[in-house]
Image (cartoon, grey):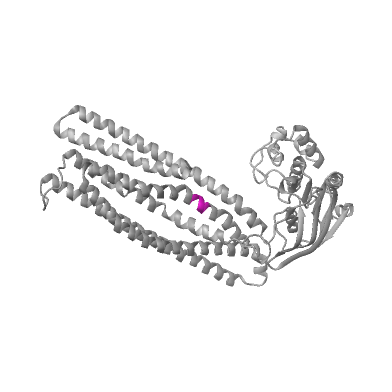
Amino acid sequence: MSIPKAAGLAWTSDIIGAGVFAWGVATALDATFTGNLRAIEAGAALLILGGMLRFASQYGAQVLGFEEGRDVAQTRRAALYPRLLGIAGPAAPALGATATLGIDHVAAEQARAARFDPVRKSATLAPILVVILVAFASRIAALILFATLVPFVIGMILAGGAARHAADRQMAAITALSALYVDRIRHLPIIRHFGAEDRIARQAGDAAHDVAERTIAVLRAAFLSSAVLEFFAALSVALVAVYCGFSLLGLLPFPAPEVLGFRAAFFVLVLAPEFYLPMRRLAAAYHEKQLGEAADKALAEVPEPASLPRPATSGGGIALRGAVVEWPGHRIGPVTLELGARGLVCIAGPTGSGKTSLLAAIAGQVAPSEGTIATLPAEAIAWAGQVPLLLPTTLEDNLRLGRPDADAAAVEHAVRAVGLDALLARRAEGLATAIDQHGAWLSGGERRRLGLARALVADRALLLADEPTADLDAASAERIVALLVQEAQHRAVIVATHDARLVAAADTVIAL
């Protein structure tokens, strides 16, 4: 049994608890009129049992739904992130749009799987179960409940169609606003230089106003759906109550089709509101459905990379043949490079020339728009970036991130090699020293050296380093240059740098 079905059945089983609870109420009330103490006690026991069953069903449904949403999100990220990272050229989404696609849209799909999908399955089964339980006590009441369901379904279909189109438009507007916001923030100096603040502010205002209008449209559709639901829910309960009351009083304007006792009438009256409860849950989660479907549609439109890097031959070589990495308004290359299993290559050029982007292409994170790049698989590449990822844990855990099973000797060797041993000597906890994700007490140079040490601990066939000597004093920079030259004796090393000393020590230089 899959988790979505299990979560849906858990929500449906809540109706069993409701039935037990309703029978307990009916038994206790009927026994109160007759003065039957044992029946009152039995009714109270059924009340407690029904409440426990409902709690267990609802708790289990929430847990199972959460697990399903998590699995859906993990599967989607595994398929989506390589596509987003591998798109280059004019087809590449803006940075803000990429963040929205990779974070917000995946979260919308996760919420739909966790909240809406299980209650949708329950909304299909639970009303039928309520009708069956009610039919044991009153076939006419069951028929009344079922009769109100048909126009309700028609009304919800009409309201749902309008809501779906509104959600699609809202999701598109949010993506556009995110892309606009991130792009304008990144280019604030240029905007101020050309005195374009007013025009950019109007653009942002128009985009925000568009999001607000489309959000109102979504809410309007949601309120319409809720109104349809509440109308038919109130109508069904009212008709059942009128029938039961008139039947007990003998005031029906037609011959009584069945004999309805107090216990059966009370049972039907208590259970009747449960008929539309699954639909109420569905309505409460309907916004997740709208956003999830809109996210599905947007993610389906993410283009596949034109060409993904292919692993090199078994010899472990790296080859770039006329490779061009192109972003909107920027072109890097063409670059041709042959690098075997060892050697030091430096990518040099002014700031903004595309050194980091070319490194990312060699790492397989970006597909070339022209030419070919044959590189190693991801598990054979170690990356030491300008701003290394830090986890809020210990220094040792961060150093072992690329190779958790590395022995203590390998970690200590890497720490000494990059010159962090002096830093650890000042810390009583040593490698067990805690850091946060910002590396608050580490300098910029120390963070870079930590990233390089982590790459050394990973011990991969290809080492990529982005500005490894930046933010370092002369002596520390000389030490890193010597280390990279030494590493190039037994592995391939490609470095993006401004450092003339590192360029002079390279076997090959790519000037951008």
Residue pictured at 44% horizontal, 61% vertical: 164
Residue pictured at 66% horizontal, 56% vertical: 85
- The kind of secondary structure the magenta stretch mainly shows is helix
Q: Would residue 200 be found to the left or right of residue 63 on screen?
A: right
Q: Quadrant of residue 362?
A: bottom right
Instruction: Report if residue 498 is visible in the image.
Output: no
Q: Which of 510 and 469 is in front in this view?
A: 510
Q: Would residue 69 be found to the left or right of residue 313 on screen?
A: left
Instruction: Report if residue 504 is visible in the image.
Output: yes
Locate residue 229, reporting x and y percent: 32, 55
Residue pictured at 54% horizontal, 55% vertical: 105
Locate residue 252, reporting x and y percent: 12, 50
Q: Magenta stretch containing residue 108, yes or no? A: yes
Locate residue 482, reporting x and y percent: 87, 45
Q: Which of 200 and 377 is in front in this view?
A: 377
Q: Magenta stretch containing residue 273, yes or no? A: no
Magenta span of residues: 107-111
Q: Would residue 7 be found to the left or right of residue 193 on screen?
A: left
Q: Is residue 214 above or below residue 285?
A: below
Quarter in which the C terminus is drawn: bottom right
Q: In this view, does 409 lie above or below 288?
A: above
Residue furthest toward the top?
A: 38
